[in-house]
Image (cartoon, rainbow, N blue to C red):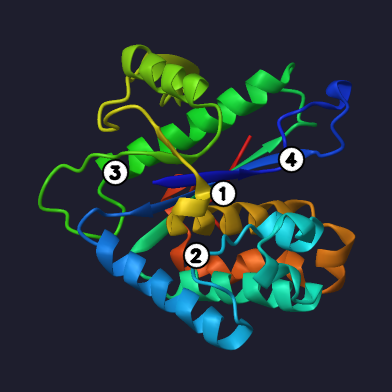
Amino acid sequence: MYVDESSDCGLPSDGSLTRYFCLAGVVVHELRWQKVIHELVKFRYWLKTKYAIYVEDELHAAEMINKPSRLAPSLQRLTKHERLAIIRHFADTLATISDIRLINIVADKASGRFFEKDEVFRQAWYALFQRFENTIRRKNFPGPKNTNGRGLIFADNTDGTKLRRYLRDMRLRNLLKVRQHSGVYSYINEPIRVLVEDPVTRDSRDSSLIQAADCVAFLLKQNVDASAYMQRHGGNTYFNRLDPILCKYACNKDVQGIVRL
């Protein structure tokens, strides 16, 4: 699973102006990895032909809309409307790749369950780890199912020390709230079993799948809290284009499988 985030973890008391923190994970079976990469490379050559963007130039969705000065020169020279079109094309391409699934987490910082920004970050990542674990164990991802699968996580260059600690803690002690037949809730200890190794941090410039996760996370954020520009130009609906590859097993209470905290 390749993961990226959108927005920040800060609370209003920290001066944050955003309500939601979003995580998106792009999941691919290791035996389908090469096929998926081939599709993404093919898309990049199509962009090169249509927009004259170098194949190695990073696609960073938020900066393509809000901070174009940070982009590669081939992207800076495009109009904002063209950069928005590229994000739309990226989403449409991902939606055609049947071998990937998307796990999405939205933490509502106004929900009252978070008292510090570290809790926003921790609970969002715990939820992502847990949904990845559950879906592997139940064999609900596409790809071969003749063996018991294992999961490995590649994250954008985020706080790797915290992620390592979180996953190691969940391997030792992982309390889950479950509802009994009587309607009473209780807790059981269900340590993580199928996620191997520590999360591996990668620079998004070097990973087309991290860039895919970045695009998904950005569109997820715009879906729940769109900027004026994205709303005006319909970009707030682009997340819906990803519906064919959403991992709806992640949360059966949500029509799109989004885990909402």
Identify whether 43 is placed above or below 20. below
Identify whether 98 is placed above or below 188. below
Residue 63: x %, y % from top left: 72, 56
- Hey, what amino acid is under mark 2? Glu
| Between 146 and 188, the one nearer to me in the picture | 146
Q: Which mark is residue 258?
A: 1
Residue 112: x %, y % from top left: 77, 24
Q: Is residue 174 visible?
A: no
- Where is mark 4, residue-wise? 20
The nearer-to-camera label among 1 and 2 is 2
Q: In this view, does 5 lie to the left or right of 180?
A: right
Asked if the residue at tag 2 contacts the one at tag 1, i.e. Cβ–Cβ closer than 8 Å, the answer is no
Q: In 3D space, how far apart are the residues under numbered discs 4 and 3 (Cα atoms)?
A: 27 Å
Asked if the residue at tag 2 contacts the one at tag 4, i.e. Cβ–Cβ closer than 8 Å, the answer is no
Q: Provide the secondary structure element on which disc 3 rests.
A: helix
First reached walking from the N terminus: tag 4 or tag 2: 4
Q: Which mark is residue 56?
A: 2
Q: In this view, does 232 lie to the left or right of 105?
A: right
- Hey, what amino acid is under mark 1? Ile
Q: In this view, does 166 lie to the left or right of 146?
A: right
| Between 123 and 75, the one nearer to me in the picture | 75
Q: In 3D space, how far apart are the residues under numbered discs 1 and 2 (Cα atoms)?
A: 31 Å
Q: Provide the secondary structure element on which disc 2 rests.
A: loop
Q: Residues within 10 Å of mark 2 (few under 14, many from 20)?
A: few
Identify whether 105 is placed above or below 206. above
